[in-house]
Image (cartoon, rainbow, N blue to C red):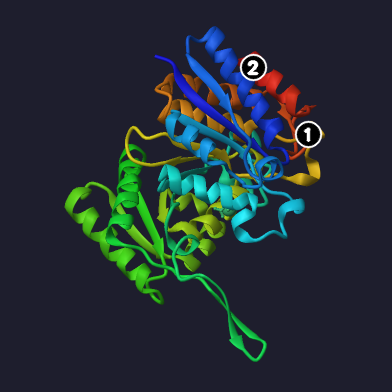
Amino acid sequence: MTKTILLLAGDGIGPEVTAQSRRVIEHLNHDHGSDVAIDNALFGGAAIDAAGVPIEDATVARALASDAVLLGAVGGPQWAEAAYNVRPEAGLLRLRTAMNVFANLRPALCFEALADESTLKREYIDGLDIMFVRELVGGVYFNTPRGIEDMGSGKRRGINTQNYTSDEIIRVARVGFELARKRSGRLCSVEKSNVMESGLLWREEVTALGASDYSDVELSHMYADNCAMQLVRAPKQFDVILTDNLFGDLLSDAAAMLTGSLGMLPSAALGDAGAPGLYEPIHGSAPDIAGKDIANPCASILSLAMALRSSLGRPDLAETVEHAVARTLADGYRTADLAGGSHLVGTSAMGDAILARL
Ligand code: IPM
Ligand code: MG
């Protein structure tokens, strides 16, 4: 049965890295028996320039009608001064909400060939394999009241609101518990219940769910500040980390850097079973290196692998793609963001090397 993937290349290096993922899809269709149709639309700054909004209604509809959405990257200095609702990032938040992708899976995986590239010593990160489950459609990113209000006499107040309902906590916690069950059986839930009621509710709901449905999973709790410290002190203590939208944003960036390679890390945002997933590299649009054919396409290609596994019904091909990327690194191919190796290559040549190993 034909599956459809919507490519939203976006801005900056997004189009370049997504182009390599497109080549991988075409190759898999041709040589590995997959049947994935590719659709495209403008997104982010590119959509603002063309249509005045970061994502058009028709694009949202196409995303909802597809099996998976593969995003490049959004944003750039030319759109950074606009109001929040017409910035490229607003398109991303709108898409996450419309697709209701409440569970954001962000692996922080250290590739063997890159274990010497981290800012941490090899012994701390060699074999590192953490999976973040970040709540993605609630919390302070979305709650109201929000805004900047005039307090009179030239003073203003900036407002954002953090809240979580039991249902929002439980549905994402389930994803965390299920993943922990498939991995090492350990889940660490992260919040600030020492100062925040939303964090206290988070802890209570996760604890209750663990006791009722997942007593086989070893559950621990950690304050977010301590988690930040533990991630750089002894990152291998973690397996699955479950946390809210804002803490997940911060902690997953820190963990990504441990692997020495922001350009290597994919992510998957998932909603209810059977609904389309949203897949994107962790890295941003990197406008400073856009258009130079030097960006690393691996995070995009590995995001495609996650889509093959979770939305396109081909977990076997997900592994094929992941192995091809690991082999390419082991054979010494590196884009400029990665040190070491024996062949310094550009974006499309990295794509060539990966395709050759597929
Ligand atoms: C991320 C990004 C986004 C976020 C921005 C671009 C809105 O930092 O996916 O981590 O904060 O969620
Ligand atoms: Mg972020």
Q: Which residue is drawn at 60% across and 51% down?
A: 89
Q: Residue at x 42, y 70 (%)?
A: 192
Instruction: Check the image and report above or below for 113 versus 93.
Output: above
93 vs 339, nearest the viewer: 93
> In screen coordinates, is 133 left or right of 281?
left
Going by the picture, which residue comes out furthest to the right?
A: 292
Amino acid type at image mark 2: Leu
Quarter of the image for residue 46 reads top right
Going by the picture, which residue comes out furthest to the bottom?
A: 153
> In screen coordinates, is 98 left or right of 42?
left
- The residue beneath circle 2 is 355
Element class at badge 2: helix
Element class at badge 1: loop
Indicate the position of residue 279 as horizontal and vertical percent values.
Answer: 51, 37
Between marks 2 and 1, how big is the CA–CA gap? 17 Å
Residue 294 numbered tag: 1
> In screen coordinates, is 282 left or right of 246?
right
Res. 89 in view: yes
Indicate the position of residue 275 as horizontal and vertical percent values.
Answer: 37, 35
